[in-house]
Amino acid sequence: MTTILTNEAKLRYVIEWFQEWSEMQRNDFLDILIEECGPVGLVHRLISKMENLGNDEDFEYDRPTLFRCRVKLFREWSYNWSRQEKDFLLLSIKSADAAFAQKYDEKLLTLIHDEHEKEYGRMET
């Protein structure tokens, strides 16, 4: 028998998993979360940037762990989520861990700044 989960149920699972993860696992999840749920304009550039690093290859093909299985499910599920559902997940995760929220925002600002510099050139200060 196959159980079909609603997007709402999938979101609850991801939030619950995040709360169970160690700080190291949360840090590993940071780039994945930005890639899957970050701003639309940045996501496409970030995906190609991350593919070039080869980190996903190492991540996917190492010995399977519960964390990796959950991240794989998250990637599959988030592909079909609306922007509103992704924003809900981000808000929930940020509310659960203020330090992670700060790291997320700092990483996002750095990526946006880097993209701006690539597009418009380095600004003199």
Image (spheres, helix red, strand yellow):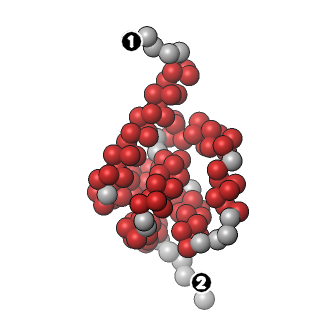
- Local SS, label 1: loop
| Image position, residue 102 (x, y; %) | 33, 46
| Image position, residue 64 (x, y; %) | 64, 71
Residue 125 is labelled as 1
Left or right of 119 on screen, residue 15? left
Q: CA distance from mark 2 to mark 1?
A: 59 Å
The residue labelled by disc 2 is 2
Left or right of 79 on screen, residue 37? left
- Residue at position x 58%, y 66% from top? 68
Between residue 124 and residue 74, name the one nearer to us: 124
Say few, some or many: other residues with alpha carbon within 10 Å of mark 1 (under 14 / 14 to 19 / 20 or more). few
Give the foreground label among 2 and 1.
1
Q: Is residue 88 visible?
A: no
- The amino acid at mark 2 is Thr
- Residue at position x 37%, y 67% from top? 19
| Image position, residue 58 (x, y; %) | 68, 56
Furthest residue in direction bottom, as rendered: 1
